[in-house]
Amino acid sequence: MEHQFPFPIFLIAFIIYTLLLFTISYFTSRRAATGSFFSGDKRAPWPVIAYGMIGASITGVSFISVPGNVLVQNFYYLPLVFGFIIGYIAIAKILLPLYYRMGLTSIYGYLGQRFGQRSYRTGTVVFMISRLLGAAVRIFVVIVVFYAFIPQDIVQTLSPTIVFAIITTIFIVLLYFYTYKGGVKTIIWTDVLQTTFMLFAIAATIIYICKEMGWTFTAMCSAVINTENSTIPGTNFSDIFDWNWATGTNAIKQFISGIFITIAMTGLDQSMMQKSLACKDIKAAQKNMYTTGINILLVNFFFVILGAILSIFVASKGGMEALGITKTDQIFPTIASNYLGIGIGVIFLIGLISASYPSAGNALTSMTTTFCIDFLGYKVDSLDVEKEHKRKVIHGLFSVLFIVIIMVLYFVSNDAVVNLVYKLASYTYGPMLGLFFFGILTKHRINDKATPYIAIASPLICLLINFLGKRYLGFDLGFSLLIINGVITFVGLWLFKENSKNESL
């Protein structure tokens, strides 16, 4: 039975959750030293970080898009997740020892010591562009859902654009205030709260749909496995994954891409590594990374199971058209808010907020850290009052920039899918992948002045390759674009290498 979700209940739930978030923020930041924003005082317990990283890694985009995508792509997403596991192991074995050995707070300091200032700045700029775009897309998706809960009379009175801008501004302002003082120290603990609510939302939705469908646990498994609907998993293994080599969702491509996506979007991303570097030592950081990999695998598995269940529920109601759903991203929000009762609707909204704040907070904090340390040369253990004030101003300016980018997305895009985030990552993180791998796998120095041009040329070449491949060969590189991008950057750096070698790193 369909229910219209009451706006006052949505508002009350949002306010209560936000107050809880700010309470945690207050207690974690009230004794924070000036350097706590950047390093978390190097005392963060690794089990807490590993658990909280579930929320930071999943994001609101995955929360909405992964379950909905099962309807049209079966379990095609899972091979990507299997690749994540190998990626986390590579980070723990290769990158974390490097970062700890060099005593880094900003991981892009490695590029400066290894290659020079141009490479250092290039890595920093690439990260900031990647994080800005990726986080903006994630926040945009969530705000679109929030916007759908606003009563139409308010929207028509103020105009859709103004209402969307107000929601965006409120979201970002709250984000600024709960991170502006404690920084990474606050985020580590608020991530725990948000991960808990997100997991609870997934579990509650699965349980409630099973109740609505009259399923026991065994009946649910049987329904998922034995369904005759070809758009969701069946007993034929070839139907669960995509084995067509020409498509972007090919299982082998997905698996390999998952490895490098994790290395790039976690191991080479300041916002993700900043928390691992807040552990007391390298062993704790590695335990965090191994545990995170297992956690991400399990949570994503439940996401696709939820997607299969939602697909069956949609079919039982006459399909997407009968429910007024035009995009797969609308499946989870529509069913949770309109068909499962007010209780599940509230849980869904809190879960969505919980999946959104960690990624956005990480992005905002890490970009402030990167700009202050890598561009302004701040030292974590020597921040005076003036520098601390500037840091807060910079934090605010990045918040404003988020609002601007999200509003641009509002005018130019109507699509919001999990694939978009990884496609953006394929183009923006590729040069970073090439730079770090060249530094780690070779001992060659490079012509530092050439690095910015190589970092610009590589994504453009990838864009051309993928366009020509799809148009003339019917071949989509999919997320493997990230690997191609990294290889092109690596080759470019090799062409501009110098004869002398670096023996110290």
Image: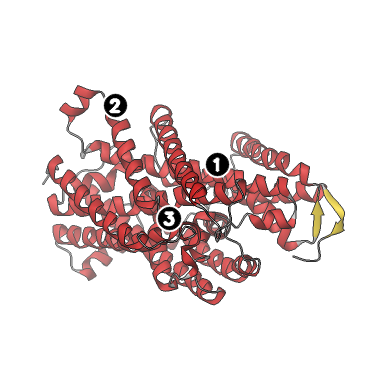
Amino acid of disc 2: Ile
Residue appearing at x 59%, y 42% in the figure: 475
The C terminus sits in image quarter:
bottom right
Between 35 and 271, the one nearer to me in the picture: 35
State the CA–CA distance, disc 3 to disc 1: 20 Å
User: Residue under circle 1?
Assistant: 129
Snapshot quadrant of residue 260: bottom right
Asked whether, in this view, residue 257 is left or right of residue 359, the answer is right
Between 435 and 101, the one nearer to me in the picture: 101
Between 317 and 34, the one nearer to me in the picture: 34
Asked whether, in this view, residue 347 is left or right of residue 170, the answer is left
Residue 239 visible in the snapshot? no
Asked whether, in this view, residue 326 is left or right of residue 32, the answer is left
Residue appearing at x 53%, y 60% in the figure: 273
User: Residue under circle 2?
Assistant: 162
Residue 423 at what x, y percent from top left? 52, 44
Determine whether the residue tagged by mark 3 lies in a helix, strand or loop: loop
Q: Residues within 10 Å of mark 2 (few under 14, many from 20)?
A: few
* Looking at the image, residue 125 lies above or below residue 445: above
User: Of callouts 3 and 1, which one flags the residue occurring earlier in the amino acid sequence?
Assistant: 1
User: Of callouts 3 and 2, which one flags the residue occurring earlier in the amino acid sequence?
Assistant: 2
Residue 386 at what x, y percent from top left? 50, 47
State the CA–CA distance, disc 3 to disc 2: 30 Å
Residue 60 at what x, y percent from top left? 36, 49
Q: Residues within 10 Å of mark 3 (few under 14, many from 20)?
A: many
User: Residue under circle 3?
Assistant: 183
Q: Are marks 2 and 1 in contact (CB under 8 Å)?
A: no
